Amino acid sequence: MSYCHKGAVKVTEDADGFAFVMNVSSLDATSYELAPKFMLRRGTDEEVERIREMLARINVDGVPGFGFEGAPWERKLHEGADWKLLPKQDWRYFVISFEGSNKTIEDLGLSWCLASTELEVGFTLFWTAPGSNAMVCHPDRLFQMRSLAKYGGFFRNVTRADIEETKAIMSQLELGDAQIQNLARQLQGLKGLPHDSSLRFLGYFALLESVLTHSPKPEDRYDSITRQVQKKLSLLNSRWARKIDYGPFAGATHEKIWSKMYEYRSKIAHGGTADFSNDLKVLKGVSEALTLIRETVKSVLRHALLEPQLLRDLREC
């Protein structure tokens, strides 16, 4: 029997389990150690069959008219109507194998929310006792990730640099203060909303403002939330080796882009309709604006892990 739990579950010392990582397309090595006894690798035949069984049970969409066969993990990407199945050895079923508690899986999932290359843990399967097959998942996030799997940009090639960044973030989160940990959990929670949800966009903005801004002084027009975010992001961006990517915005300035981001935010918050062909043309569209705010929040939170006092000081100035 399969049970769905949320969070960490302790299993017997000699038990083993694995977590299905939904969006890996390839690894630059045979496997990567994420923590002692936690290995990221391609799934075995037995593990793949268990994953496929679980995906079919929770009704993950395959190719219309073909049942589960041909689901995104088993077919070539960007084929349009002329879809083609991959050879079985090229299927995209990757797992984290482990022993004992799955708490580290939960920690990795949180760390990947801040990482440059985000990996998505769909669910964890293991035996809690003979004949008892346990499943751990977060149903809201699983539902949204399964929907995204059908579209371009979901799958990731994973390099050693990605693994080292993830391990560093996990260590920093473990040692970080409670406020930053809480903000990271809130960031992770937004994954339970539809990808293009306006509430998700507003949620990213709320996180950005909570870590960067203070309540503006009514008598000081230069202390507005918009100006605070523009100025403080400019200061932080000058310190980062990996700069904010303004490439999609056709050479628009930092100030112009964030002014329009706030205009877009205001329209959403007040029930308006965004017009990307007119006033908000510089932002291109919903996807570009969402990517910018999400990646910016991640960058700010990563920096908060490294220099928490700097971010506290910056928020008050």
Image (tube, grey):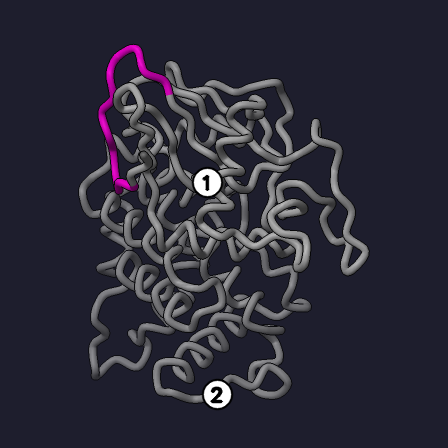
Position of residue 123 measured from the top left corner of the image (x, y, whole percent): 40, 39
Pointers 2 and 1 in contact (CB under 8 A)?
no
Q: Between 82 and 170, which is closer to the camera in this rendering?
A: 82
Which image quarter: residue 270? bottom left
Position of residue 19 measured from the top left corner of the image (x, y, whole percent): 42, 31
**Is 240 covered by the magenta stretch?**
no
Q: Residue furthest right?
A: 82
Going 59% across and 60% down the picture, which residue do you hit? 246
Q: Is residue 150 above or below residue 241?
A: below
Going 30% across and 59% down the picture, which residue do you hit? 212
- Left or right of 39: which side holds 86? right
Please rate how many residues cluster around mark 1, counting C-alpha atoms within 10 Å: few if below 14, some from 14 to 19, many from 20. Answer: some
- Left or right of 315: which side holds 251? right
Position of residue 249 measured from the top left corner of the image (x, y, whole percent): 63, 67
- Left or right of 149: which side holds 89? right
Q: Which mark is residue 273?
A: 2
Q: Nearer the viewer, mark 2 or mark 1?
A: 1
Which image quarter: residue 90? top right
Magenta range is 4-16
Please rate how many residues cluster around mark 2, counting C-alpha atoms within 10 Å: few if below 14, some from 14 to 19, many from 20. Answer: few
Q: Residue furthest top?
A: 14
Measure the alpha-carbon separation of dots 2 and 1. Answer: 40 Å
Q: Going from the N terminus, do you reach mark 2 or mark 1 first?
A: 1
Q: Between 88 and 271, which is closer to the camera in this rendering?
A: 88
**Is 6 covered by the magenta stretch?**
yes
Q: Main secondary structure of the magenta part?
A: loop
The three-letter amino acid code for the residue at tag 1 is: Met
Q: Between 291 and 43, which is closer to the camera in this rendering?
A: 43
Q: Which residue is labeled 1 in the image?
A: 54
